[in-house]
Amino acid sequence: MIELTQVTKTFGTNHVLRGINLTIPSGTSMVVIGGSGTGKSVLLKSILGLVIPDGGTITLDGQDVTKTDRDAFLARFGMLFQGGALFDSLKVWENVAFRLMRGPAKRPKAEAREIAIEKLRRVGLKPATADMFPAELSGGMQKRVGLARAIAAEPEIIFFDEPTTGLDPIMSGVINELIREIVREMGATAMTITHDMSSVRAIADNVAMLHDGLIRWTGPVAEMDASPDPYLQQFIHGRADGPIESVR
């Protein structure tokens, strides 16, 4: 579904992506792991076209993403943002239906609201939540609203940016389980960036370890623990000693 070949990106003297090669098969869940500042977000933004790579190619279904119709391209994606990114001035259902009421496939307001309530129900929120404002919700509920919005338009591809950041362990487990169930139900292709190993084990089919602008290891999540790769082993076990230098 998505293929990156020798993708590079530099900001000034900071070489963020140094030649990324990564393949995400259709209908699978890829989780990209790595420490803060390793380029995970830049990688995601490059696929979406929010950041233009300096070199290399990114293809979606074999088509160069820089040469496709932008609206049609983005219509295939859903996104769960790290901080929720809900519009404070809009009611919950309006946040969920935001995309449905805009663009070429604009839905009537009543229909959009009905879909929004159904998606809220799918992520475990009651219909009464629809007319509340984001500020009236807990962090976990806001994350669920963000997930409902991500799936509202039935996208083929869903990106999850640090989906469990700021959540307690129990709510993190709930969100991870929801993500896994929904991706499977929809048959969607998913890409998650995270440093939360509980998320990795819960939602990944495949894992890619990003460090210093390169994919150091990639493979099925079932093979992750047995891998001899020193970067991967240091990261997944949280060791201070290893090839990944810690700031002290």
Image (cartoon, rainbow, N blue to C red):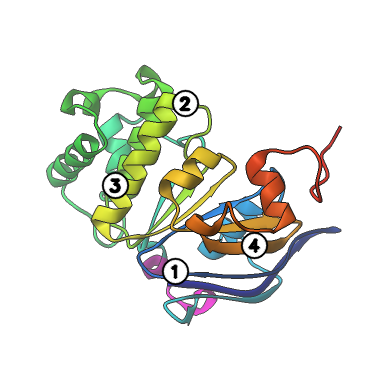
Which comes before the other along the chain, label 1 or label 4?
1
Please state which amino acid type lies under the numbered disc 1: Arg
What x and y, as percent, mark residue 223?
A: 53, 58
Please state which amino acid type lies under the numbered disc 3: Glu
Indicate the quadrant where residue 45 lies: bottom right
Which comes before the other along the chain, label 1 or label 2?
1
Q: CA distance from mark 1 to mark 4?
A: 31 Å
Residue 43 covered by magenta stretch: no
Which residue is depicted at the point 65% across and 49% down?
34
Please state which amino acid type lies under the numbered disc 4: Trp
Mark 1 highlights which residue? 70
- SS at mark 2 in the image: helix
Q: CA distance from mark 1 to mark 2?
A: 38 Å
Q: How many marks?
A: 4
What x and y, as percent, mark residue 238?
A: 68, 38
Foreground mark, 1 or 4, reads 4
Range covered by the magenta-colored residues:
65-73
Mark 2 highlights which residue? 169
